Image (cartoon, grey):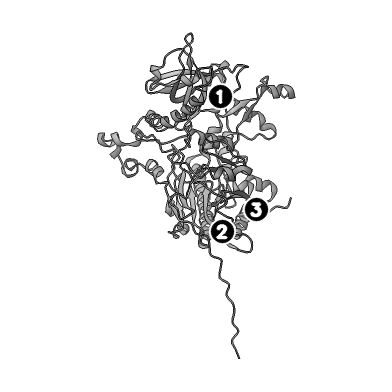
Amino acid sequence: MKAQQHQVRSPPTRAHIPFLPSWQRFHEFAAPKESSNSGGDAATTPAASQHHPYARQYSHIYAARLAALRDRCVSNAQRTLDVSSSSSENVGSAEVVEQIIEVKEGVWSVLVGTIVKEMDPKRRPLVNSSYGSCDTQSFLFPSVNGSDKEPAQESLRSYLFDSEKGDVLHLEDSSGRVEIAPMEIGDDREEHNFALDPNRVATGVVAAVIGKVSVEKGVMYVHSVHFAGPPVDALKLDRASNKQTSHEPTLLIISGLGCGADSPTDVSSGGSLALRREMLLEYLTQPKIGNGASFCRMIVAGGGVASPNQLESGNGEISNGGKTTKGNSHDDSGKSKSVNAARSSKLAESLRDLDIFFSEVLSSGIPVDYIPGWHDPTNANWPQRPIHSCLLPHSCSFVDLFGRSTNPFEGILSVGDDENANMRVLGSDGLNIADLRRFLAMSSSSKIEQNNNVTNGDSTSVEGTSSMDALHQTFRYGHMAPTGPDSLPTFPSSESDPFVMQTRPGIYFAGNCEKFETRLVDVNGDEVDEANAMAVEGEQPVTRLVCVPRFAESGEVVLVKLNTLECEVVSFCDVRA
């Protein structure tokens, strides 16, 4: 009798894209040798104190930032001068001034410096930002639902630039500073896109301004402002040559996994975050469910573990294995130790769930890069160090597939045989974008007056900018974290600023956003219509901007096709609508 032969179906060949990590330049600033290796009182010796990272002044990083971005700002301003040379306003005759102290009054000039916003905190209400669900957005912007609308407005209003309240805008370099103000646009002249808007910039942004210094007031009235932008060296894509295939290499970006606890949304709706992660795992590994063979890499943009606030209930209790321990109490130190032990235990459980999830993804052959986030056990100051290998032992056993990166993240994907066909991916967990959003807002008092929605006698309503607009602004600035170190905590550096965009990314993302957003921008940082993207890509580089939503709250992941930069979102829902 003939033995029955069983046909074994081999799994589909997974798309493989060579990857070269380049986030090491951030790690150089995130882990200074002097602070990592010195122990005891070694840092107190005179020789060690000279090299200790916190012995440096933070002013050095502003000087390094200005030196790195000055030439780009001047180049962008020169293009405007060439266009304006034929106008009757003599703007084209403006000359570049090397130092602010050398500027002449009443003469068209080009100044380059760091923007400084002086806003008196005494004139503004005390802002108590709620910790909410402990993501970056809810901490910086309290919930706008129901009764929490006024606290959100109070938070936004406190950062709104208002010259009537004594706020002043300066342009500063090593020689001095000059007050700058927007130039009034006359009726005979069309308002341009480069006009100065104090609520579209933040302290730390490097810019070139074209204008004249008033003889009477000594204020420079700005005709136009020009940011550095990234260098022009991105991948030029051609949709005609890069045809879509069934296994086109696809990059998967996810953030806010929130392992260890269900999100507040799940608690109210009865959903299960663990079930959604299991659905995602099947989508990645099962060919019949999703096109898993096309996924060449997975990037986790922070938020891997649940936030500490999700361990606490409304009355300040901390859940620990069925027991409740009172928090925020004034009892003896023994109870405080038990609270800390409960929190540590919960964090260990969250890391264990995250480690198991990563190991299951890695076992299917998909490389994973993990970017540490706000609540991860690593340093708080940017750049954040990679999470330690002992915290994710199972994942770290996949030496060739698992990458522990810094925050921010940077890497190069080879999408073609040509050396120029390298896709540079740049992004972060989104804290830099959330911090910048506090300073980018606009007043809409007329809307409130029309709707008769005046609260506490203040008719000024403030509309905060979206995460995508803030991400787009950092792209125009040519700098990932312009609010550091003034608002965003960073390491001091005297040699260079690690957050300056040294090369133009092909994909630029931010994690932990409130919703999915995407935008395609050209070499000048202007938005490109998706319908006309084919014509633009053949002539100049383009960059895909992506705001990645929190998976714990939205159940969404983002897919970016590397050959064409097409972007889509896939949603996983375990609750019937």
Q: Earlier in the sequence, mark 2 or mark 1?
A: 1
Image position of 168 with respect to 554: above or below: above
Q: Nearer the viewer, residue 450 or 416?
A: 416
Q: Residue furthest bottom?
A: 1
Q: Which mark is residue 197?
A: 1
Q: Which residue is at a point 57% across and 75% down the rendered structure image?
A: 8
Give me the C-alpha separation between circle 2 and circle 1. Answer: 44 Å
Q: Which residue is at a point 52% across and 28% down the rendered structure image?
A: 201
Q: Which mark is residue 320?
A: none
Query: Label 2 sits on what residue type?
Result: Ser
What crowding class fits label 1: few (fewer than 14 Cα within 10 Å), some (14-19), or many (20 or more)? Answer: some
Q: Nearer the viewer, residue 395 or 41?
A: 395
Circles 2 and 1, Cβ within 8 Å, touching? The answer is no
Image position of 74 with respect to 407: above or below: above
Query: Label 3 sits on what residue type?
Result: Phe
Report the residue marked by disc 2: 294
What crowding class fits label 2: few (fewer than 14 Cα within 10 Å), some (14-19), or many (20 or more)? Answer: many
Q: Position of residue 328 (x, y in %)?
A: 55, 38
Give me the C-alpha separation between circle 3 and circle 2. Answer: 19 Å
Circle count: 3
Q: Position of residue 196 (x, y in %)?
A: 54, 23
Q: Position of residue 379 (x, y in %)?
A: 43, 42
Give me the C-alpha separation between circle 3 and circle 1. Answer: 40 Å
Query: Label 1 sits on what residue type?
Result: Asp
Q: Position of residue 553 (x, y in %)?
A: 63, 46
Q: Which mark is residue 572?
A: 3
Q: Is residue 379 left or right of residue 281?
A: left
